[in-house]
Amino acid sequence: MASVALLKVGVFSASLIPLGVLVQRITANDLGPDPGQVITESLGIAAFQLLLATLTITPLRKLTGWNGWMRCRRMLGLFAFFYAVLHVLAFLQLILGWGDLWSTFTKRPYIVVGAAAILLMIPLTVTSTKKMMKRVGRWWKPVHRLIYVSAVLVWVHFLWQARSDVTEMAVYGAFLLILLSLRAYWFGVVSLVPLRKT
């Protein structure tokens, strides 16, 4: 139990590092000529990294045989959603503004992809507690498999914005592919809708 508690403290602290670094850069006025873009991108990348970290938990459990990793999965998922919400708020406040949403959606398809990814994260967040897990019942696992779809959409969202240098997104994409391949290998391709009992 002590090892699990230490792990949770470590994960919690590490999850706050991107926000801490960003606040430090803002305080030091070290965001370059386009601070709004830097803030928005930093929060979005942090959300993506934490989403990938969430997906890494199950492979870690399978590879190490230690179930303690699973105690951190919910925390990582909630932090991923937290940063995703901050990313959206920063985009609306610092880049787009609050009065031109529809025209921006129609002109920038990558925003539609990003919005879809965040919308898929909402049911994951709402049903993340043990109480909701019991209430949702057999639908809980199919609902939470939406995290794979969300992660792919987030990757497409950032890849679509990369103009000349796609190296970073290529690395993230390769890592995501490995995680999805491991999932397919260990658990098989499972339908998002549970089979009805006969």
Image (cartoon, helix red, strand yellow):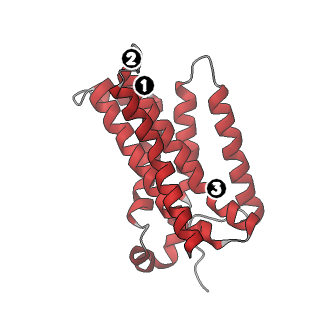
Q: Are marks 2 and 3 in contact (CB under 8 Å)?
A: no
Name the residue at 59% across, 70% down. 3
Q: Quadrant of residue 83?
A: top left
Q: What is the crowding at mark 2: few (fewer than 14 residues within 10 Å), some, or many (at least 20)?
A: few
What amino acid type is highlighted by mark number 1? Val
Image vertical order of residue 144 relative to residue 14, above or below: below
Name the residue at 56% across, 70% down. 4
Front residue of this view, candidates 85 and 141: 85
Residue that numbered label 1 is attached to: 38
Name the residue at 56% across, 23% down. 162
Q: Secondary structure at mark 3?
A: helix
Q: Picture coordinates of residue 15 (x, y %)?
A: 48, 49
Q: Are marks 2 and 1 in contact (CB under 8 Å)?
A: yes
User: From this viewpoint, is residue 31 visible?
Assistant: yes
Name the residue at 68% across, 71% down. 66
Q: Picture coordinates of residue 122 (x, y %)?
A: 40, 56
Q: Picture coordinates of residue 10 (x, y %)?
A: 53, 57
| Residue 56 numbered mark, or none | 3
Q: What is the crowding at mark 1: few (fewer than 14 residues within 10 Å), some, or many (at least 20)?
A: some
